[in-house]
Image (cartoon, rainbow, N blue to C red):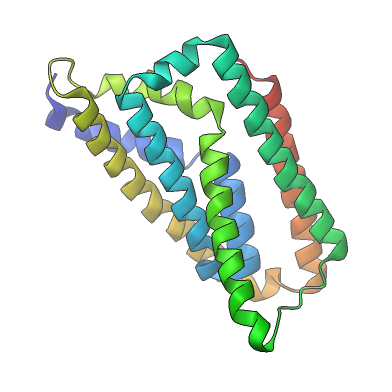
Amino acid sequence: MDLLGTLPAFVLAVLLISASPGPAMALIVRRAALRGLPGAVPTVLGLELGLYVWALVAGAGLAALVAASEAGYLVLRVGGAAVLLLLGVRAWRAAWRDDGREPAGPAAAPAARRRWWTAFGEGVVVQLANPKAAVFMVAFYPQFVPAEGPVFATTALLGLLQITLETGLYLGLAAGVARAGAWFRRPRIRRRLEAVSGTVLVGLGVRVAVSSP
């Protein structure tokens, strides 16, 4: 199999898969709407770091073990569902409690740093706790990795290409959503967005909880 010959199909597949709704897109839209493009950047970077870790795991052959193991898949499924449910409940709480005001004065910079790392960590955890990521890597990447070549190195390169494409796509999405940021950050609209985001995340958590390999 010629790797260069399969790259166009790989790029097209990555773009189509990345554009499909899921936890990643829900997180990015929420962050971009409430915090603007700068607030969505750490979420995107965290999600892509988590995805690249899965790519390396797939290249090492460990993802296949997770996908084939009922116990391993169950642990990921429960963990992923718990993370999404927690994020959803937090969004619901914010819909009722958050008045939309930002910290001012000396507390503003530390609060901004905490939000950056919180958003980055959420992205990493959501991606790593996604059981579908393991199944996806096992089913998707071998179609483009030559069996006679260096499997791990080729998978790592394809993973790097995928996260590059996804980062550009997701940052474009975040920029588009952020353009309407002033409208989204109106107190009434903000609360409604948090409520809708919470419902979407909880729904995704339930779907992950009942999913099968």
Residue 178 location (% of width, % of height): 56, 68
Residue 128, can we see it? yes
**Left or right of 1 in this view: 33:** right
Residue 106 location (% of width, % of height): 65, 87
Looking at the image, which is closer to me, 77 or 32? 77
Farthest right residue in view: 96
**Left or right of 6 in this view: 194:** right
- How many numbered dots are placed on residues in this image? 0
Q: Residue at x 29, y 38 (%)?
A: 11
Looking at the image, which is closer to me, 137 or 172? 137
Q: Is residue 153 shown above or below 166?
A: above
Image quarter of residue 147: top left
**Left or right of 125 in this view: 82:** right
Image quarter of residue 118: bottom right
Looking at the image, which is closer to me, 120 or 194? 120
Say which quadrant the N terminus sits in. Answer: top left
Residue 185 location (% of width, % of height): 71, 72
Q: Is residue 114 shown above or below 5?
A: below
Looking at the image, which is closer to me, 42 or 182? 42
Q: Residue at x 60, y 66 (%)?
A: 114
Farthest bottom residue in view: 105
Q: Residue at x 62, y 22 (%)?
A: 75
